[in-house]
Amino acid sequence: GPIEIDSSFIVRNSLGKEVAHSELSFDNYAPRGAPTSAWGKTDFAKRSIIMAALVEGTLTIEVRIMNITPTPVNSSPMPFIPENPICQNILKKFMDEESADVAFEVGSGSELGGNDHKRAKTSPTTFHAHRLILQDGAPTLAELCKPGEGDLTAVPITDVK
């Protein structure tokens, strides 16, 4: 529904000094096209004052807007928290072979058992990763992953017990 707002518009010159000021209150501000629309003020400032405040053709206007819509006693306003999908998008890239630019091949080669007896060779387990994420979360590990000639840098890690 409509909201009530107080607003002010301040024009500042090159020294930051206020040269024009206007305050507006909209008791029933609604989206454009709604039955009740609010418009600006026609006599904001003289043209000569505005032109004198230009700094290399740029006008600095400070805008302050405050919602003064009364809140019902038994309710608290819900804060606006914008959605940011970056965390979910990064989680989707976990172990994603198509987008990975690093592959850790862990456990390949012959392994030593108890009393230094050799066990049979095992096939490596491959973990796919992304260099950009490694640089932030594990910089030492990222150092092992210098870009190679192809799309994917293979990093063998053989001394795993």
Image (cartoon, grey):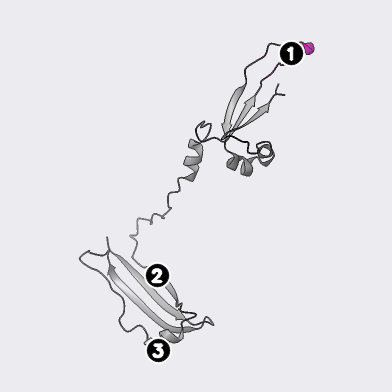
Q: Which residue is mark 2?
A: 65
Residue 113: numbered disc: 1
Which residue shows up at 52% across the image and 82% down it? Answer: 14
Circle 3 Cα neighbour tier, 10 Å, few/some/many (<14 / 14–19 / ≥20): few
On-image quarter of the C terminus: top right
Of mark 3 and mark 1, the one earlier in the sequence is: 3
> Magenta residues: mostly which secondary structure?
loop
What residue range appears in magenta?
Answer: 109-121
On screen, residue 66 versus residue 119, left or right, reads left
Of mark 2 and mark 1, the one earlier in the sequence is: 2
Separation of marks 3 and 1 at Cα, in angstroms: 89 Å
Which residue of the protein is positioned furthest toward the right in this rendering?
Answer: 115
Q: Is residue 154 above or below residue 61?
A: above
Which residue shows up at 43% across the image and 49% down it? Answer: 83
Which residue shows up at 37% across the image and 86% down it? Answer: 47
Horizontal and vertical percent position of residue 51 = 42, 85
Circle 2 Cα neighbour tier, 10 Å, few/some/many (<14 / 14–19 / ≥20): few
Q: Which residue is mark 3?
A: 48
Separation of marks 2 and 1 at Cα, in angstroms: 72 Å
